[in-house]
Image (tube, grey):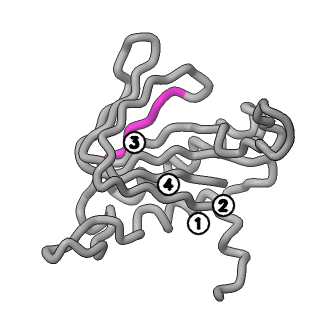
Amino acid sequence: MRALIQRVTGASVTVEGEQVGAIGPGLVVLLGIGQRDGEEDAAYLVDKIVNLRLFPDDRGRFDRSAIETGADLLVVSQFTLYSSTRKGRRPSFVEAAAPEEAEPLFQKAVDQFRRSGLTVETGRFQKHMLVEVHNDGPVTLMLDSQDRHQPRR
């Protein structure tokens, strides 16, 4: 499972002209689900995201987490995080999970984010969405649940 997270001052998602989710200060989480991903991947990323120290303390250092600041979360399904551009000029998405497999796992991740106690908004799965992001910093990080299997250097 992959997540592109952005610290924001605010963000919203619109589907077919209707705003379906909006947050104030917090994190936008673009969440991609791969063919081999499972509930352990979701649990790992959710825990990592809500506890990463991405928010400034009084000295401006990254020293506070989403949990500590009460940040809002906007979680949006993003299968294109599993694109491959190694060959040719058109991205391939063969590593992304099929929608019927990805949607239940996406929902489990959203449920886990909600159990953290943070306010969580979402887009609409498998819909064309317009996501407005007011990136703060900018602070943008890429996380991959497979990294947990890599030894530390």
Q: Is residue 31 above or below residue 41?
A: above
Label 1 – label 2 distance at C-alpha = 5 Å
- The N terminus sits in image quarter: bottom right
Upstream in the sequence, badge 4 or badge 1? 1
The answer for how far apart the CA atoms under marks 1 and 3 are is 18 Å
Is 45 on the left-hand or right-hand side of 54? right
At a point 74% along the width and 32% down the height, the residue shown is: 100
Sooner in the amino-acid sequence: mark 3 or mark 2: 2
In the image, taking residue 105 as reference, residue 14 lies left or right, namely left
Q: Earlier in the sequence, mark 3 or mark 4?
A: 3
The residue wearing badge 3 is: 74
Instruction: Name the residue that disc number 1 marks.
Output: 44
Badge nearest the viewer, 3 or 4: 3
Q: Earlier in the sequence, mark 1 or mark 3?
A: 1
Query: Could you tell me residue 120's position as x and y percent?
Result: 37, 44
Q: Which residue is mark 2?
A: 41
CB atoms of marks 4 and 2 within 8 Å: no
* Element under disc 3: strand
Q: Which residue is mark 4?
A: 112
Q: Amino acid at mark 3?
A: Leu
Residue 90, how many percent across, how many down?
78, 30
Amino acid type, residue under disc 4 in the picture? Gln
User: Residue drawn at (28%, 71%), measured in percent from left and top?
Assistant: 64
| Cα separation between marks 4 and 1 | 10 Å
In the rendered view, tell whether residue 125 sits above or below residue 153: above
Point out the stretch of residues depicted in magenta: 119-124
Q: Earlier in the sequence, mark 4 or mark 2?
A: 2
How many other residues sit within 10 Å of disc 2, few (<14), some (14-19) or many (≥20)? many
